[in-house]
Image (spheres, rainbow, N blue to C red):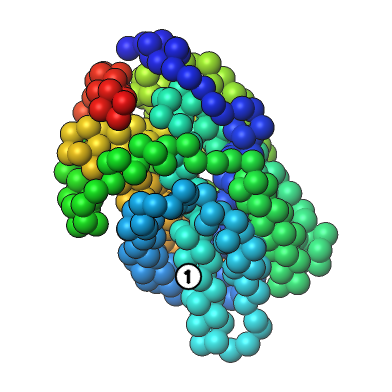
Amino acid sequence: MSVASNLNKPKDIRLKEKVSYGLGNLAANLLLTTANTYMVYYYTDIVGITAAIVGTLLLVAKVIDGVFDLGVGAFLDGQPNNRNEKAHPWIKRLAVPFGIALILMYSVPDLNENIKVIYAFSTYIFAMFIFSAISVPYNTMISLASTNPIERSELSSYRNMLGSVGGWALTVVTLPLVAFLGNGRQGWFFLAVIYGIVASAAYLICYRNTRERVTAVAKTTEKGKLRDKIKTVSKNKYWWIVLVIMILTFITAGLGGVNVYFAKYIMGNANYVGALGTANYIPMIIGSIVLIPLAAKFNKKTIVMGGLFLNTLGCLVILFGIHNVTLIIVGNALKGAGSAAIFGLIYAMFGDTVDYGEWKFGKRAEGLTFSAGSFSEKIGSGIGVIILGFALNIGGYVGGKAVQMASALQAINFIFVYLPLLIDIICIILLMFYGLDKIYDSIRIDLDESTN
């Protein structure tokens, strides 16, 4: 279905604001993607905590953090309606604490096992709390910056594009930079200092150059108690579909930590992790650029479905060329292009479910709706990291050992190829039941007429 009927809607967001908004996701990736890719490795091979303890630590942290995510969303929706902005100010307030949290996470002291575990758990969960507190308002800005679905798609695309730039850069430069800064604990600490400063600066730029525009609409519709909004969200079938798809895709993102193990033990050289990252992120960046004109011609479901099929194809290429470096790189590139479509539009889809909830049930709940986005990122990626930790432990992986058992290698292959393939197939099936794009234009017309 074409979305050309939305092209005549007024557009208020300039390029500077779109780029600045995208910088917020670049900042987020400096913490979350670094944690997803290197946290298990840092804890097992640098700090010396066993994979089983790491898996348990992350599991408990994610359960606690998931509840906190929803609390942040409820807090945003529960703010007084007479406020000019409800999400935007929190980006400024939490920019510096975000950088500090990142640094603390990679500062585990070289003391006894119990102290290391307690410190790792405390700083990890603190970092995830700060991530939630800033990410929920940041993601909510997509819904509050514009009611134009094309602009929402563009904001989501710039969000993914700049986030992918950050993800690619850290994948390529992290290990060489750690080595340059002294390796071991020292190298990781100074790396975190650099990333923390850059992340805080990026969030501050994001705050300065973005603003909310949907406040007036929210004031006319945000009536009723918080529990009514919770009921509204819980009854929103399209929100549930997007939520589950997002959790599953972020499980795949969380499994990205297997790259360093796959490069070292399957491909034969840990330095291949940079090539894997480049093969994934460059198509993702290019795809995010291509996505902007595509989103004006095709609906979100069609584009995201295409991305899932590209992901599936990429997994199959890797499966049949598991010992061929070229085919592995090609497969990763296909997955990167597919991910551009998925991550580039998934937050815009959340924004559309906000409007559907208002139209269907008479309540807007941006905070609760988008808290699900942050919840999905961390719960999904956390589950992925947990699966990685436990799979390595079950396979008999021994941190720092040059040669691993066959069972450990099988566990690495399962995490790198088979599990992402299964997740993509499940997401394709779920997306078949998403029908919001077909009725969105009429929903938007009804909502606009009701506020005039």
- Residue at position x 51%, y 64% in the image: 130
Residue 304 percent location from the top left of the image: 39, 26
Q: Position of residue 24 (x, y in %)?
A: 59, 46
The one nearer the camera, 97 or 302, is 97
- Closest to the observer: 126 or 216? 216
Residue at numbered disc 1: 125
In the structure shown, which secondary structural element does the residue marked by tag 1 occupy?
Answer: helix
- Relative to 117, does residue 71 appear above or below in the rendering? above
Residue at the spot 66% in from the left edge and 32% down from the top edge: 16
Identify the residue shown where x is 37% and y is 58%.
Answer: 79
Decide if residue 202 is on the left or right side of residue 427.
Answer: right
Q: Amino acid at mark 1?
A: Ile
Mark yes or no: residue 77 visible.
yes
Q: Does residue 55 appear in this view?
A: no
State the image coordinates of residue 35 (x, y, percent, origin top left).
56, 58
Q: Position of residue 413 (x, y in %)?
A: 46, 47
